[in-house]
Amino acid sequence: MVRLPLTPAEVERGQRLGALLRQARGERSMLVTALDAGVSPETLRKIESGRVATPAFPTIAAIADVLGLSLDAVWAEVNRSDGAAGPRRSDRDARERLAS
């Protein structure tokens, strides 16, 4: 099976997702976060760096659960239309917004 190249919009969403997860993880270890979510640390690293722009839904659901993020908030943040990568507010404001 041949995988089609990602569109620029898919790449941008992947970068926003990675920035969001990195920020939500904060000072928490990548290793601990990955293991708690049941994914490999390499998978989490690739998602956070944007190298995996379209990760599987169960993977994101597991990571979001470990980080205490609502999937609705993750979806809204990743699909923002302003084109900026990562949350625009301060770390504390963004976490509060995403945790609701």
Image (tube, helix red, strand yellow):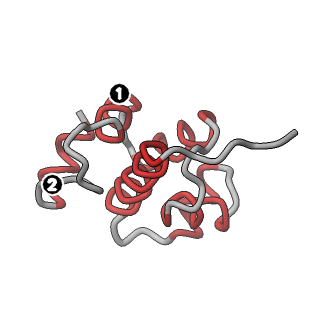
The foreground one among 31 and 12 is: 12
Task: Where is residue 96? Give x, y as percent.
Answer: 18, 45
Looking at the rendered structure, the kind of residue marked 1 is: Asp
In the rendered image, which residue does mark 1 sit on? 72
Query: In what element is the residue under mark 2?
Result: loop
Residue at image x 68%, y 53%? 39
User: Vertical placement of 95 versus 29: above or below?
Assistant: above
The foreground one among 16 and 90 is: 16
The quarter in which the N terminus is drawn is top right
Q: Residues within 10 Å of mark 2 (few under 14, many from 20)?
A: few
Task: Where is residue 41? Give x, y as percent.
Answer: 64, 66
Task: Where is residue 69? Give x, y as percent.
Answer: 37, 41
Residue at image x 51%, y 44%? 7
The quarter in which the C terminus is drawn is top left
Q: Which is in the foreground here, disc 2 or disc 1?
A: 2
Q: CA distance from mark 2 to mark 1?
A: 18 Å
Residue at image x 57%, y 62%? 51
Task: Where is residue 43? Give x, y as percent.
Answer: 65, 60
Query: In what element is the residue under mark 1?
Result: helix
Q: Is residue 98 left or right of residue 4?
A: left
Farthest residue, direction top: 72
Residue at image x 47%, y 50%? 14
Instruction: Say the numbered circle drawn on residue 88.
Output: 2
User: Vertical placement of 81 versus 37: above or below?
Assistant: above
